[in-house]
Image (cartoon, rainbow, N blue to C red):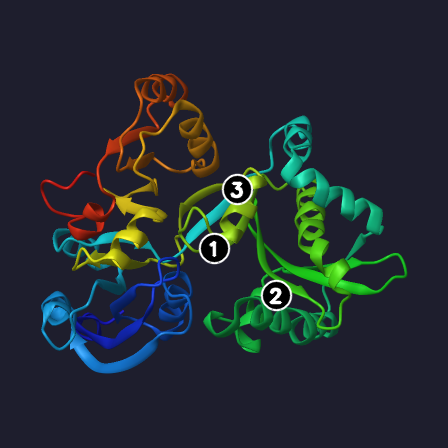
Amino acid sequence: FSLPAQRCQETYLLRGMEAQSGALLTTLYSGTPQTMRYFCGRLYSQEPLVREMGHRPVWQLQRLGRSGTVQADLVLLERDCFWGASMRRAGYLCLPQWVLFRMDISRPWFEFRQRFARKSLRSNLTRVRKSGYYYSLATDNQAWRYFYEHMYLVYARKRYGDSCIVYSPRQHHRFFEKGGRLLFLHTRDHRRVAGVLLVPDNRTLKFHSLGIRDDADPRLAAGSGTALYYFSIIWAREQGYRCMDFGHCRPFLDDGLFLYKKRWGMRIDKSPRIKTLVGIRALSRRPALRNIARRMECVFLHDGRLKGLACIGHDQPVEEREMRERFQKRYIEGLDRLFVVAPGGFTPAAREAVAAEAGGRLSLLAGEPAQILLNAGRRGNII
C-alpha cells in the first residue's frame, strides 16, 4: 500500500434514522464504498443520505466531525493495519475488516458426529439426507466456466447485493489453476444445484467460493450450503487434509454468517490475506449513539490479539442464567478474551458462576457501553 495514499481518503457524511431507535444518526465515514454500504445496513433503518466530502486527511476527521457544519455522532475510519497503533491512540476501537474461519478436521469422527447432532445443525443435515443430494468433482475448464457464470456470480450478487466483492474471471481462474477442484451438488434427478471451488494449500483445503444456480428451486437452495459444507469436510478428510479454511466473515458476533460458521465448530483467526482495520469512534452521547453501543457485539484487535465485545442492552443487573447464555452464544474459539459490558452490572451469582466456567476467557465490566466508543484507546477507558 502507499503511505501518501493512506494520509488522505475519500470521506462521506451519512445522515439517517438509526436502525432500532429511529433517532437521527450522523456518521462521518472515510474508506471504500463497499465497506460503507455494509455499515449503512447495520446502522441505519433505511438507506441514509450520503454526501461526498472529498479527500480529507484522516487525522482531521474527529475535528471535522465536531465542527458546526457536520456535528457527527460517529466516525468510521477504514485503514491498513500499519496504522493500528495510531488509531488506537486516537481513541478508535479497532475492528479487523474481516476475520478468518478455520476448522480442524483431523479430530476423531465422533467429535464431528456430536457437533452434527446439535439441534442447530441436525435439522439442516436431516433436510440434506431427505433431499437425496450427492456430489461429484470436476477439474475441467468447461465446468469452471459454468460454475463461475451460473452459480458463483449469481449467488454472490443476490446474497450480498451492492456490498459484494467478487473475483474477476481471470482472478477466479487463477485459483482454479492452483490445483483447484469443483465440488458440485446434485439432486436425485442428477441436476447440478450448487457448487464450491476447493483450493489446496499444503495440508489445508480452502473452501474458496460458493455458488448456487440462478434457477434453483428455493426449497433445494436453502439446504445446499449445508450440504456443500458437509460433503467438503467428508472429502477433505478422505484426502488426508488436516485443516479447512472456510474464508472470511465480517467481525460481528451477531452476524448471520458468523453464527452459522460458529455452529460448525470453527475457530476464528486474524486473516493473513486481508489486514485492513475499521476504527469506530463516538463523538456524541446522543440517543442514537447510546443505542448503537448497547447493541455492539463485535471482534476487535488489541495488543495484536482478537478479543470479543458483547454489550447488554438493559439497565437491570445481569443474572446468572443470562450470563451463561451470553457466554455460550458469543464466545468462539480464537478469542483471547470476551468482554461483557452491562450498564446495570452483574449479580454476585453471575460473577461466581462465570468465573468458574469461563476459565479466564471472560471479563465482566459494569458501565455504559457508549464509553467504549467515546474513548476506546485512551487511559481511563473501561477496557
Q: CA distance from mark 1 to mark 3?
A: 12 Å
Q: Position of residue 51 (x, y in %)?
A: 27, 81
Task: Name the residue located 14 percent from the left edge and 56 percent from the top edge.
Answer: 86
Which residue in the rendered view is the most extreme toward the right? 189
Q: Earlier in the sequence, mark 1 or mark 2?
A: 2
Q: Earlier in the sequence, mark 2 or mark 3?
A: 2
Closer to us: 92 or 166: 92
Label 2 Cα neighbours within 10 Å, binned few <14 / some 14-19 / many ≥20: many
Marks 1/2 in contact by CB < 8 Å: the verdict is no
Q: How many marks?
A: 3
Q: Describe residue 179's horizontal placement relative to residue 234 as left or right.
A: left
Could you tell me which secondary element the residue under label 3 belongs to? helix
Q: Earlier in the sequence, mark 1 or mark 3?
A: 1
Could you tell me which secondary element the residue under label 2 belongs to? helix
Quadrant location of the N terminus in the rendered image: bottom left
Could you tell me which secondary element the residue under label 1 belongs to? strand
Q: Position of residue 321 (x, y in %)?
A: 44, 25
Provide the residue designation for mark 1.
Answer: 248
Label 1 Cα neighbours within 10 Å, binned few <14 / some 14-19 / many ≥20: many
Provide the residue designation for mark 3.
Answer: 262
Q: Mark 2 belongs to which amino acid?
A: Phe
Q: Position of residue 110 (x, y in %)?
A: 68, 26
Q: CA distance from mark 1 to mark 2?
A: 19 Å
Provide the residue designation for mark 2.
Answer: 176
Q: CA distance from mark 2 to mark 3?
A: 27 Å
Closer to us: 338 or 316: 316
